[in-house]
Amino acid sequence: NAGVTQTPKFRILKIGQSMTLQCTQDMNHNYMYWYRQDPGMGLKLIYYSVGAGITDKGEVPNGYNVSRSTTEDFPLRLELAAPSQTSVYFCASSSRMRLNTGELFFGEGSRLTVL
Amino acid sequence: DQQVKQNSPSLSVQEGRISILNCDYTNSMFDYFLWYKKYPAEGPTFLISISSIKDKNEDGRFTVLNKSAKHLSLHIVPSQPGDSAVYFCAASPGANAGNMLTFGGGTRLMVKP
């Protein structure tokens, strides 16, 4: 199993550009998440999904959009990139059983720089 | 306002000794606590967890203690060079814990051979 796969691993954007961070998981997990990590800070939840067709905002959703058309995929869209969105983005997933323990499975991260 | 705080950004320990990583929280609604470990260029991985009704949970060399009010600690005994990583404390209000995780800023542990 590949687990949680994120692409791209690195990206540099200009202010105002748009892009999509891709996330796919092959564990048949219903629950998927997008977090961002800023230097010296903990991970902050951007959006999450409890199943295909269902998404909800996390702590820091402004400037982002998500969709969940399949169980496997949970892309994160940045419409108008801003320097404040420079961060490392992590996608994660979990099963119903693991959810109760808080155990999430994370991808390797996508480092985004907005100049 | 950080609800989960790890006040030591870094910690250096000699191989074979005990590593103690601390975590404080302010939200009384938290009742489930977790530790994640993160190596460079990798995503965090789940390490160990504890509910608020327990004061100790052990898993091999790793022990999480929950004995003081709004304070947790992770003990690694004995510490090994492979334990060098960033450790994140996380907290949740409990039900569907994974949906509501609040992370601390992390502590970078360096275990010297």
Image (cartoon, grey):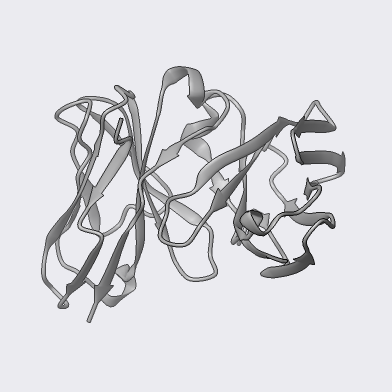
- Give coordinates of residue B46: x percent, y percent: 55, 39
Rendered-image quadrant of the N terminus of chain B: bottom right
- From this view, report whether residue A80 is shown above or below residue A61: below
- Give coordinates of residue A31: x percent, y percent: 36, 28
Pick the residue in front: B23 or B107.
Answer: B107
- From this view, report whether residue A23 is shown above or below residue A52: below
Outermost residue, front side: B113
- Give coordinates of residue B22: x percent, y percent: 77, 55
Residue B32 seen in the figure: no
Q: Residue at x 15, y 78 (%)?
A: A14
- Give coordinates of residue B96: x percent, y percent: 51, 25
Residue A18 seen in the figure: yes
Outermost residue, bottom side: A115
- From this view, report whether residue A3 is shown above or below residue A27: below
Q: Residue at x 29, y 36 (%)?
A: A2
User: Residue A66 sits in which quadrant?
Assistant: top left
Q: Residue at x 51, y 57 (%)?
A: B39
Q: Residue at x 82, y 39 (%)?
A: B66
Does B55 sit left or right of B108 as displayed?
right
Pick the residue in front: B82 or B36.
Answer: B82
How many labels, in total? 0
Rendered-image quadrant of the C terminus of chain B: bottom right
Does B43 sit left or right of A15 as displayed?
right
Outermost residue, top side: A97
